[in-house]
Image: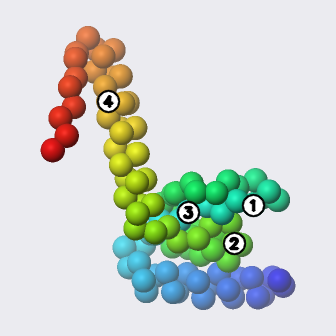
């Protein structure tokens, strides 16, 4: 792909993402690619312009709703573990209650 074509594709993809995700970011899921060193299935939140680059380079795809929900759950667990450790260092005990 020539440089002009690449940046044209990135601009076009950015415009499409801005229309679909007006909040300015979207969720991506990585695609296994040995040449670029990416593994399959890692979800991340990315600004639309950066996401467009990843989609054009085919290192990522848009994440599904189920993948995003699982990612949010994992992020919440990580935050709770981190907070629990901070409280423990201060000598406080924590018990998380799930609603």
Residue 95 figure quarter: top left
Seen in the picture, residue 78 relative to 56 is either above or below; the reply is above
The residue depicted at 28 percent of the width and 21 percent of the height is 87
SS type, badge 1: loop
SS type, badge 4: helix
State the quadrant of the C terminus. Answer: top left
**Label 4 to label 2: alpha-carbon separation:** 36 Å
Residue 7 spot, x, y in % from top left: 71, 82
Count all numbered tags in the image, as a single digit: 4
Q: Nearer the viewer, mark 3 or mark 4?
A: 3
Seen in the picture, residue 37 relative to 10 is either above or below; the reply is above
Q: Residues within 10 Å of mark 2 (few under 14, many from 20)?
A: few
**Label 3 to label 4: alpha-carbon separation:** 27 Å
Residue that mark 2 sits on: 58
The residue depicted at 31 percent of the width and 25 percent of the height is 84
- Residue 39 lies left or right of residue 34; in this view the side is left
- Residue 36 lies left or right of residue 24; in this view the side is right
Residue that mark 1 sits on: 33
The tag on residue 29 is 3
Q: Earlier in the sequence, mark 3 or mark 4?
A: 3
- Residue 72 lies left or right of residue 11; in this view the side is left
Residue 60 spot, x, y in % from top left: 62, 67
Residue that mark 4 sits on: 83
**Label 2 to label 3: alpha-carbon separation:** 11 Å
Residue 83 spot, x, y in % from top left: 32, 30
Please report contact status of discs 1 and 2: CB closer than 8 Å, yes or no.
Answer: yes
Q: Residues within 10 Å of mark 4 (few under 14, many from 20)?
A: few
Residue 43 spot, x, y in % from top left: 52, 57
Q: Earlier in the sequence, mark 1 or mark 2?
A: 1
Please report contact status of discs 1 and 4: CB closer than 8 Å, yes or no.
Answer: no
């Amino acid at each position: 792909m020539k440089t002009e074509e690449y940046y044209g594709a990135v601009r076009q993809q950015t415009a499409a993402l801005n229309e679909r995700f007006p909040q300015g970011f979207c969720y991506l899921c990585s695609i296994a690619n040995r040449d670029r060193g990416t593994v399959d299935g890692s979800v991340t939140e990315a600004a639309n312009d950066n996401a467009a680059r990843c989609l054009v380079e085919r290192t990522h795809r848009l994440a599904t709703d189920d993948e995003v929900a699982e990612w949010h759950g994992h992020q919440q667990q990580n935050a709770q573990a981190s907070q629990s450790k901070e409280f423990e260092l201060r000598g406080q005990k924590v018990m998380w209650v799930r609603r």
